Image (tube, grey):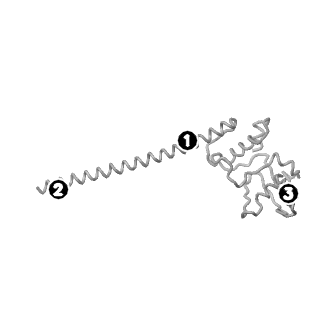
């Protein structure tokens, strides 16, 4: 009788263990199914975004999305600015005597608190601050240029998140160049610009 009780207890213990493993396995499979479904939705969203870009810009090449480092392009543009200023029609100076340079192939960050004039500075530098009087000088590769001449060939990505999140920086710039550029621009010209 004592042996039978031990055997019954052992059988119950094994059954409880098997039931526990079964329940754990079911929970694990449900979790895996849920994760696969979420990953599938993410992949579908990613594929939709790629197809959308390819549909509207069929000539743009969309590569895999991974950082490939920054390489200096041959024939890049060095931009220097001296005593850059911006005066609003009411006489208020938003920028005063800003001097600096952006070297070709280098990444620059313009940082400051809200209202410090970052966007006004970029608008003035790109000749897009039509709302005020721009002063100072801008040189591209050592040659002084006219502000109005810069409008069609110079721009910047604003601080607001208006870029396509799945494109690399290069792809975003190419997309923007193809979207905003002239219809008769060749692929070679866009490549040189970007």
Q: Are marks 2 and 3 in contact (CB under 8 Å)?
A: no
Image-based side of 116 in relation to 167, left or right: right
Callout in the foreground (3, 1): 3
Q: Are marks 1 and 2 in contact (CB under 8 Å)?
A: no
- Label 1: element kind: helix
Q: 138 or 135: nearer the eye?
A: 135
Callout in the foreground (2, 3): 3
- Label 2: element kind: helix
Mark toward the start of the polypeptide (3 vs 1): 1
Name the residue that disc number 2 marks. Answer: 6
Image coords of residue 107 (percent x, y) = 72, 54
Q: Which mark is residue 126?
A: none
Extreme residue in the front direction: 90
Image coords of residue 105 (percent x, y) = 74, 51
- Label 3: element kind: loop
Mark 1 crowd level (few <14, some 14–19, many ≥20, 10 Å Cα): few
Separation of disc 2 and disc 3 at Cα?
94 Å
Mark 3 crowd level (few <14, some 14–19, many ≥20, 10 Å Cα): some
Name the residue that disc number 3 marks. Answer: 132
Mark toward the start of the polypeptide (2 vs 3): 2
Extreme residue in the left direction: 1
Separation of disc 3 and disc 1 at Cα?
46 Å
Q: Quadrant of the C terminus?
A: top right
Callout in the foreground (1, 2): 1
Mark toward the start of the polypeptide (1 vs 2): 2
Name the residue that disc number 1 marks. Answer: 44
The residue lying at 88 percent from left, 52 percent from top is: 144
The residue lying at 46 percent from left, 47 percent from top is: 34
């Amino acid at each position: 009788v004592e042996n039978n009780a031990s055997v019954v207890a052992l059988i119950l213990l094994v059954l409880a263990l098997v039931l526990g493993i079964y329940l754990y396995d079911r929970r694990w499979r449900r979790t895996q199914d849920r994760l696969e479904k979420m990953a599938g939705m993410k992949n579908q969203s990613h594929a939709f975004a790629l197809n959308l870009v390819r549909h509207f810009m069929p000539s743009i090449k969309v590569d895999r999305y991974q950082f490939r480092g920054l390489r200096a392009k041959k024939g890049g543009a060095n931009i220097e600015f001296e005593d850059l200023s911006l005066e609003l029609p009411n006489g208020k100076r938003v920028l005063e005597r800003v001097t600096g340079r952006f070297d070709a192939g280098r990444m620059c960050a313009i940082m400051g608190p809200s209202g410090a004039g970052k966007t006004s500075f970029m608008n003035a530098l790109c000749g897009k601050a039509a709302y005020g009087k721009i002063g100072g000088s801008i040189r591209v590769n050592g040659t002084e240029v006219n502000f109005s001449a810069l409008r069609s060939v110079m721009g910047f990505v604003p601080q607001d998140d208006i870029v396509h999140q799945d494109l690399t920086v290069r792809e975003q710039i190419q997309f923007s160049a193809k979207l905003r550029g002239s219809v008769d621009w060749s692929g070679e010209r866009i490549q040189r610009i970007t």
